[in-house]
Image (spheres, helix red, strand yellow):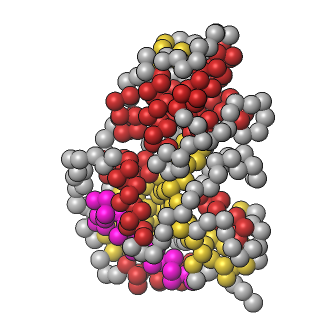
Amino acid sequence: MLTAPGPAGIHHLLRRTLGPAWDFISDGDHLEVRHRDHGTPYRPPRRLLPWAELLSVLEDAFAEQGVLRVPVLPLRWGRETELTISAIQAMDPVLKDGRTTPYRQGFIPQPVVRLTAERLPTGALADGFLTSFVNTSRVELIPDVKAYATAFDELLTVLSRLGLHARHVSFHGRLAVWRRRQVEGVSLHFHHADMPVGDLVLLWNIDRPDRLILDLGTSLERLAWARSRTSWCELIFGRLATAAPFDVLDTLRTATLLIGNGIDPTARGAGSITRRLLRQMPTGTVIPSMCRVVRENLLFWNLMQPAQRCWPDVATIMEREHARATGAAASPRSSAMPVPSTTPPAAAR
């Protein structure tokens, strides 16, 4: 009879894999793992890595471990969700359909859209959160639980290439099996200098616990933030950070991703998310560098996968939709778009 992996076995394998330099603290089923030099202060590097260089460092580090970069999933999903919300959806055939071959496996810098980002009581996005980001992930079938434990040590190697060294990394979570529909798993989270960065998850289909899946997930943006410890707004938008309120820039960034991938504003389906995002921005102040905002956003998203549209077309569709909502006249390839002068309302969840 096939049996699911045991949490006690994971604890033992992690101890053996990470070695004596790590302290293991258990409280019931909660586990915390810290390096013995974890109290050493973290000093960020002086130079910020450009997005392309950061992505290249990650790609090379994973490739050295035999984990090659693979094409991203389509942003339009249309299965259980309208849009792709996680790179782990690449494993749906194995996790949910009982098949043996996933859509993809390897290193996937997957653009995703999530309108459930954490927000402040005012409705503004909290630092560290966006409605779209790059779900930088290693997802693959693994032979056994030992390979899951080995992935922790391999992650430390990848992080060290970014200057995020083991003494500042910690792991924590519950060594208890959770279940969501036909999928079970065990999740542990990793932090850098007390900043949440990502998760290492072991998953399997309840009917096929022998087909184990590793989901090592973080975000490109949060990795950059953990490394730099700079202003979140300046990190994401650079010189455009003062062009508009953060939530407006975030909306334009997500809308650029959607429209650039052919997901135009519509009444139903995936396009309704594009419409909802753009129509939550009432008339108000003006972004004098609207075209530049779209262009810079598209340059970023093109690092993951070339867009289906060029930036002038994206900007025109964006302005036209906003004009329909406000009753204003849209001019093609305008350099400015009305935006709210106050904090926008929270996105629909």
Q: Nearer the viewer, residue 287 or 329?
A: 329
Query: Residue 316 location in percent, x, y?
Result: 59, 23
Query: Residue 112 location in percent, x, y?
Result: 58, 48
Q: Is residue 68 above or below residue 114?
A: below
Q: Is residue 51 left or right of residue 89?
A: left
Q: Residue at coordinates 62% horizontally, 80% vertically from top-left?
A: 5
Q: Is residue 63 above or below residue 189?
A: below
Which image quarter: residue 179? bottom right
Which image quarter: residue 128? top left
Q: Is residue 195 above or below residue 247?
A: below
Query: Residue 279 location in percent, x, y?
Result: 65, 23
Q: Is residue 348 visible?
A: no
Q: Residue at coordinates 39% horizontally, 73% vertically from top-left?
A: 64
Q: Nearer the viewer, residue 197 or 6?
A: 197
Residue 154 falls within the magenta-colored stretch: yes
Q: Is residue 229 left or right of residue 145?
A: left
Query: Residue 216 location in percent, x, y?
Result: 51, 65
Decide whether the magenta segment is chiefly helix, strand or loop: helix
Chain part drawn in magenta: 144-169
Q: Is residue 239 left or right of residue 271?
A: left
Quarter of the rendering occupied by the C terminus: top right
User: Which residue is the extreme one toward the bottom?
Assistant: 1
Q: Residue at coordinates 36% horizontally, 53% vertically from top-left?
A: 54
Quarter of the rendering occupied by the N terminus: bottom right
Q: Is residue 143 visible?
A: yes
Residue 13 falls within the magenta-colored stretch: no
Q: Is residue 21 left or right of residue 121?
A: left
